[in-house]
């Protein structure tokens, strides 16, 4: 196993804000040539047993996964966890708490959108929710497209649901320390997800990587659906600078919405150390 492995270690199912089941994702990953897979639902590991079983049935090597929402320097940052024990009590409880505020947040989002002339979005979003504990902005976006307020979900996020726009409700997620601690405490590796997506200044980004390392974080997504080739090279450089392992994942959510399909990603640039080299003992084969 090396940096040319077709690993896809970031995607979402109906257990969070994806549109496919873990079973269908496993088959799609295998058919697309994925050689090592992880399902990383937002703030949730309730789909892990299904993903493990589906991957085994498909003959697909599998790592447990999740993507934890974190508040750092007033911004939302996502931390992917891989290769943990998904029965670990502290991880399970930490994720449960992290999911906890989503219901109230969604009702406030709906009230704010109603004030902007878009009624009924809470009820509308619920039609798209697969997990009652995980109502997300993605479900609102799907409903607002269906109801004709926007043409597609990127347009929803350009006009609504983001900082300064109708429907945005600030939220306090997990701390960086807790999220990294839950993952590593359960025997997994913590990874900064899609770093180029955050609006940090160079100083803030340096602080994020430095604190992440100090808490025991070990990896960064170098190749993701959200990165350009130049961004992948930038974060490959960060792997050397911060002594981090490199990860790779599409962040696939839906055949209708995601521009990067499972396994259809550039290879990791050399000479990084792939995160899977440190997770061999955690692979479900
Ligand atoms: P939430 O966890 O409720 O804040 O929702 C975050 C999710 O919204 C992300 O995981 C993406 O799936 C989706 N999302 C956020 N920003 C965008 C965007 N600009 N375009 C499309 N989807 C987005
Ligand atoms: Mn998502
Ligand atoms: Mn994310
Ligand atoms: Mn994601």
Image (cartoon, grey):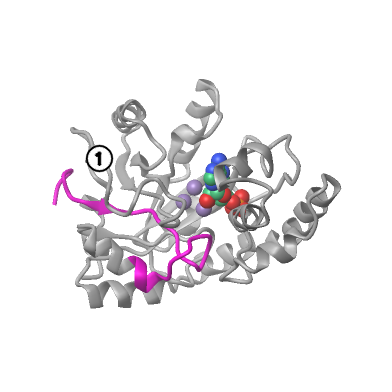
Residue name at image x 36 percent, y 42 percent: 224
Residue name at image x 59 percent, y 56 percent: 142
Q: Would you place residue 32 above or below residue 224 in this image?
A: below
Q: Is residue 72 left or right of residue 280?
A: right
Residue name at image x 36 percent, y 31 percent: 228
**Residue assigned mark 1:** 266
For this rendering, which residue is in front, 260 or 16? 260
> Quarter of the image holding residue 120?
bottom right
CB at disc 1 and ligand 4 closer than 8 Å = no
What is the span of residues highlighted in magenta in the rendered image? 1-25
Mark 1 secondary-structure assignment: loop
Q: Is residue 276 left or right of residue 215?
A: left
Q: Is residue 43 left or right of residue 193?
A: right
Q: Position of residue 22 (x, y in %)?
A: 39, 70
For this rendering, which residue is in front, 7 or 179? 7
Q: Position of residue 197 (x, y in %)?
A: 49, 35
Q: Is residue 230 left or right of residue 34?
A: right
What predominant SS class does the magenta segment belong to?
Answer: loop
In the rendered image, residue 17 lying in the magenta stretch gets the answer yes
Q: Position of residue 196 (x, y in %)?
A: 45, 32
> Which quadrant of the figure contains the C terminus?
bottom left
In the rendered image, residue 15 lying in the magenta stretch gets the answer yes
For this rendering, which residue is in front, 177 or 8? 8
Residue name at image x 69 percent, y 48 percent: 149
Asked if one can make out residue 231 in the rendered structure from this viewpoint, the answer is yes
> Quarter of the image holding residue 82?
bottom left
The residue carrying pointer 1 sits among few (fewer than 14), some (14 to 19) or many (20 or more) residues within 10 Å by Cα, namely: some
Q: Would you place residue 42 above or below residue 72 in this image?
A: below
């Amino acid at each position: 196993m090396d940096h040319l492995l077709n690993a896809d270690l970031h995607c979402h199912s109906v257990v969070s804000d994806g549109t496919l089941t873990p079973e269908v994702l496993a088959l799609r990953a295998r058919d697309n040539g994925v050689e090592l897979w992880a399902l990383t639902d937002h703030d949730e590991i309730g789909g892990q047993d299904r993903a493990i079983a589906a991957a085994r049935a498909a003959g697909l090597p599998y790592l447990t996964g999740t993507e934890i929402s974190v508040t750092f320097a007033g911004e939302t940052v996502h931390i992917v966890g891989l290769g943990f024990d998904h029965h670990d009590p502290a991880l399970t409880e930490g994720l449960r708490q992290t999911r906890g505020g989503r219901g109230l947040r969604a009702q406030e989002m709906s009230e704010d959108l109603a004030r902007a002339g878009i009624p009924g979005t809470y009820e509308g979003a619920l039609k798209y929710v697969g997990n009652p504990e995980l109502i997300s902005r993605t479900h609102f976006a799907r409903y607002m497209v269906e109801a004709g307020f926007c043409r597609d979900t990127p347009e929803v996020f350009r006009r609504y649901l983001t900082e300064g726009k109708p429907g945005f409700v600030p939220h306090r997620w997990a701390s960086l320390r807790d999220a990294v601690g839950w993952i590593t405490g359960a025997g997994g590796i913590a990874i900064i997800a899609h770093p180029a997506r955050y609006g940090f200044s160079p100083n803030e980004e340096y602080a994020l990587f430095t604190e992440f390392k100090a808490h025991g974080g070990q990896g960064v997504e170098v190749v993701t659906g959200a990165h350009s080739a130049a961004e992948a090279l930038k974060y490959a450089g960060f792997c050397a600078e911060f002594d981090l392992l490199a990860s790779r994942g599409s962040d696939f959510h839906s055949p209708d919405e995601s521009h990067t399909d499972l396994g259809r990603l550039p290879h990791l640039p050399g000479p990084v150390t792939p995160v899977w080299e440190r997770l061999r003992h955690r692979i479900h084969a």
